[in-house]
Amino acid sequence: MLQMFLLEGRLMNKRSSSSKLFFYDLHGGGAKVQVMVDASQLYLDLMLNMDISSKTRSKVISYIRSFLDKLDFLEVETSMMNMIAGGAAARPFVTHHNDLNMKLYMRITPELYLKELVVGALDCVHEIGKQFRNEGQEQARQF
């Protein structure tokens, strides 16, 4: 029986015991978890390894899109720049629109917009996009 677990945290360390055995230390929510991965679980290595090629990244995103399409999710695009900052506790990146002479904030998370779509009768929506979290270089983050 296949079991799936969701782990969320900051990757603090990656070590290898051999060419086929890797250890990842995840910290988050006051807990520390060590994940052991063998070569047959390379999907986890692709998710955590910052050195993956853009071709591999593209294939992973295509797979996620097709998976969600099969579940009848609608892909949407929400605003990247906003007139007010909001959506998370992180400080937003600030930019300036020259033609309108106004300060705009880069989005931190699309969560509020996606929730508005769900409340507005679009039951299954998703977005694959960039987030702009201005949190500095601290080692741990609260979830």
Image (cartoon, rainbow, N blue to C red):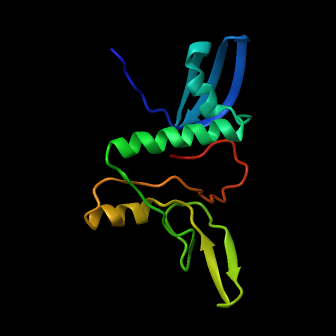
The percent position of residue 91, horizontal first and vertical second, equals: 62, 65
Furthest-left residue in view? 121
Q: Residue 42: name its quadrant.
A: top right
Q: In percent of the image, x 40 and y 61: which residue is there?
A: 114
Furthest-top residue in view? 18
**Is residue 29 shown to the viewer in this render?**
no
The percent position of residue 73, horizontal first and vertical second, equals: 35, 50
- Compare residues 4 and 40 and report the one nearer the observer: 40
Q: In percent of the image, x 70 and y 47: which residue is there?
A: 138
Circle count: 0
Query: Is 7 displayed left or right of 1 in the figure?
Result: right
Q: In percent of the image, x 44 and y 59: which residue is there?
A: 111
Q: Residue 3: name its quadrant.
A: top left
The percent position of residue 117, horizontal first and vertical second, equals: 34, 65
Q: In percent of the image, x 62 and y 78: which residue is there?
A: 104
Compared with residue 44, is residue 90 higher up or lower down, i.e. above or below? Answer: below
Q: Point out the image quarter for the N terminus.
A: top left
- Compare residues 26 and 62 and report the one nearer the observer: 62
**Is residue 27 shown to the viewer in this render?**
yes
Compared with residue 13, is residue 40 higher up or lower down, i.e. above or below? Answer: above
Compared with residue 43, is residue 97 higher up or lower down, i.e. above or below? Answer: below
The percent position of residue 14, horizontal first and vertical second, equals: 70, 25
